[in-house]
Structures are given as structure tokens and as C-alpha cells.
Image: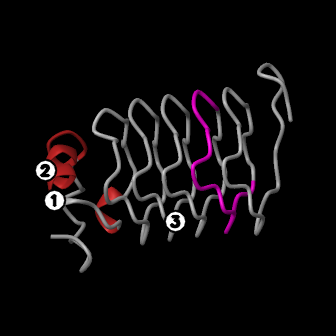
Amino acid sequence: MGSEDEPESLDWSFQPRSGADLHKGIHPNSNFKRCILEEADLTEGNFEGSDFSRAAMRGTNLMKSNFDNCDFRGTDLRKAKMNMADFRNCKLAGADLRGIRGRYAIWQGSDWWNAKVDEDLVKVLLKKWGRPADETPSKSNP
């Protein structure tokens, strides 16, 4: 793995990596497509521009990490810890965000309303990161 100071792109697509430790890792433009990252530690890392589409990330710790411009479409993020993480301009259509802790994350420009989200979190996110006026709610959300 790259050190805390050296960026290293990873290609872990289609690999089982449950419990992986990428704490404080700098891994921009990495490929985690369909990777199994359940219960992994991605805290305080930089994953800008990475592809997490259709990954299994149930219970993963993403706190204090940067995920700007990442693809999370179809990703299972149930019960993930996402507080204080940065999800600017992320694609979230079809992602499962039920049971997450992400009230204090940055969701600017991300389409969280196209994901499966708990009603209480929807209320919080609407107040601070409301959907654009031209967006209609998807059928999976209230």
C-alpha cells in the first residue's frame, strides 16, 4: 500500500477485501467496482475520483474521508459510518444508504435522493443538501 504521503491508485475490482485497512490512505482514481469491502476501515483517506459502483460496503468506516466525484451507484452502504466525510458530486443512484451515520457529512452536488435512504436522514439531508428543483424523487424514496 502507498504510505500516507504517497498517492497510489488501486484496482481491487471484483475482489474480496472484507476488513481491509486503508486508514489514512491516499488512493485517488482507484477501482473498487464490485469489491467486497464490508467492515473495512477507510477513515481519513482520500479516494477522490474512485469507482465504488456495486461494491459491498456494509458496515464500512468512511469517516473523515474524501470521496469527491466518486461513483457509488448500486453500492450497498448499509450501516456504514459516514460522518464528517466529503461526498461532493458523487453518483449515488441505487445505492443503499439505510442505517448509515452520515448526518454530518458533506453531500454537496451528490444525488442522495436517488439512493435508498431512511426517512429521518431524508429530512436532515433535505434541510442542508436539498435536491434541485427540477429533480423528482425516485420511486425508492418517500
Instruction: Determine whether, in the image, residue 3 is placed left or right of residue 70.
Output: right
Quadrant position of the C terminus in the picture: bottom left
Give the Cα distance between marks 1 and 2: 6 Å
Which region shows up in magenta? 31-45
Say whether marks 1 and 2 touch (CB < 8 Å): yes
Instruction: Determine whether, in the image, residue 32 is placed left or right of residue 83.
Output: right
What residue appears at the point 46 percent right and 35 percent down from the top-left corner?
86
Tell me the residue that label 2 is attached to.
123
Compare residues 63 and 70 and report the one nearer the observer.
63
What residue appears at the point 48 percent right and 59 percent down from the top-left corner?
91
Compare residues 34 and 128 and report the one nearer the observer.
34
- The percent coordinates of residue 128 (x first, y second) are 20, 39
Q: What amino acid type is highlighted by mark number 1?
A: Glu
Tell me the residue that label 3 is attached to.
75
Prevalent SS, magenta region? loop
What residue appears at the point 72 percent right and 40 percent down from the top-left corner?
28
The secondary structure type at the circle numbered 2 is helix
Figure disc tally: 3
Instruction: Determine whether, in the image, residue 6 is placed left or right of residue 138.
Output: right
Tell me the residue that label 1 is attached to.
119
Compare residues 130 and 85 and report the one nearer the observer.
85
- The percent coordinates of residue 21 (x first, y second) are 71, 38
Mark positioned earlier in the residue sequence (1 or 3): 3
Q: What amino acid type is highlighted by mark number 3?
A: Thr
Vertical arrangement, residue 100 with respect to residue 73, above or below: above
